[in-house]
Image (spheres, rainbow, N blue to C red):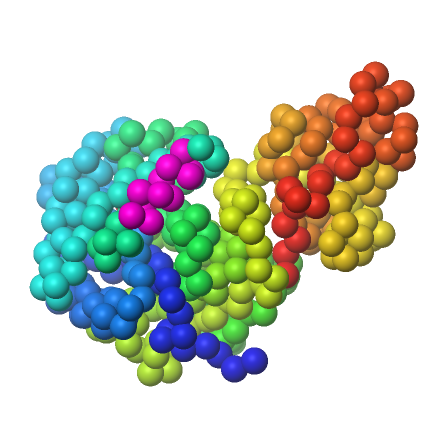
Amino acid sequence: MSTPRLQDFRRIVVKVGSSLLVDSQAGRLRESWLASLAADLAALHGNGRDILVVSSGAIALGRAVLKLPPGQMRLEDSQAAAAVGQIALARTWAEALSRHGLTAGQVLVTLGDTEERRRYLNARSTIDKLLEWRAVPVINENDTVATSEIRYGDNDRLAARVATMLSADLLVLLSDIDGLYDAPPDTSAAAHHVPRVERITPSIEAMAGAAGSELSRGGMQTKIEAAKIATGAGAHLIIASGHVDYPLRSIGEGARCTWFIAAGNPVTARKKWIAGSLEPKGTLTIDAGAVAALRRGNSLLPVGVVRVDGGFERGDAVIIRGPDGAEIGRGLCAYDANDAQKIRGRASADIASILGFSGRAEMVHRDNLVVAG
Ligand code: GLU
């Protein structure tokens, strides 16, 4: 399959990292770059596509406005800095887009807004409405109220969650780096750029070091995590450098970047929500027979589960791994961790006598299961 073109997509989410928007040395916005990106967004939008922006920069901008000293910030300081920066960020986007006749709509979300299904549906319908009105949602985490346990913390995964929530078919992560390398490019001269990733295997995951700068928390790891979420739910993902003017046009003109190809099987909206789960509460490790059964479209039975990790409740999202540790998929477990532990490796017919009640024959029913591409 040849590499797709940006014009081929219908609904595109573009994630912009803090270090692209804010020149931290000078302590101000990189306005002319933003103007070039806004022109790119307008060109895509003008052709009938839906455009969503996930913009970082609230903390970085707040920091610049408040003239806070460089270095690591405590959570409460970044929360307060974000309160100042988010206003400036929203105004900046509104102005940059309005120069092209586009209307921006600010949407601030917290982790619960996407992880809890009812709130997820609510956030989705609001953003859908903005798109119906041809506005451009400009989305960020509500950093001011998000404390450590309840925050995404990085906008890469947030952007992937937004892309799956709105059934986008493409997510572009604009960042410091022009894609995935098989070794850290700043320290290894022999590092090779990877232009295209068909499947996120353990060796692809191993390529992602933990690099991150002071302002943008997401290193390559969160980008790979985002790619898993997006491609698992049927969206392609691009990691591209934002260090050029007109960064989207540049991708179209062949600038170096990495494409992560979406899993082929189209999935239902509910399954997208499961696939995009940011906080799986545990892991089920399964045997080779169960891996094959899942790939054929079957449910996961207790007999195929060899190991149960984590402290999940009934109905929580879990990661399913094969014997080699590779992620096979994600699903909602019909049993809590305790019961799952007791019935793993056992025949479904024995569940009632082991647990003292008759539960479902499946540990994870196929309707609640998303198998990675
Ligand atoms: N939400 C943070 C901000 O706007 C950025 C998170 C990230 O860098 O990924 O400053």
Q: The N terminus lies in which quarter of the figure?
A: bottom right
**Residue 6 seen in the figure:** yes
Q: Is residue 246 above or below residue 205?
A: below
Q: Position of residue 350 (x, y in %)?
A: 90, 28
Q: Nearer the viewer, residue 62 or 277?
A: 277
- Which residue is at 21% across, 68% downward? 42
The vertical placement of 138 against 147, above or below, is below
Determine whether 125 is above or below 132 in the image: above
Give the camera-side residue of 160 and 74. Answer: 160
Image quadrant where residue 333 sits = top right
What residue sits 30% from the left and 61% below the top?
Answer: 51
Dominant secondary structure of the residues highlighted in magenta in the image: helix
Question: Residue 349: horizontal and vertical position, in percent?
Answer: 90, 31
Q: Is residue 286 left or right of residue 336?
A: right
Please check the rendered image and state whether residue 186 is part of the magenta-colored stretch, yes or no.
no
Q: Residue at 51% x, 67% y: name it.
A: 260
**Which residue range is magenta in the image?**
119-129
Verify whether residue 126 appears in magenta: yes
Q: Residue at x 54, y 45 (%)?
A: 270
Viewer-proximal residue among 163 and 64? 163
Quadrant position of the C terminus in the picture:
bottom right
Report the front residue among 80 and 314.
Answer: 314
Q: Can you see residue 40?
A: no
Q: Is residue 206 left or right of residue 101?
A: right
Residue 262 location (% of width, % of height): 54, 64
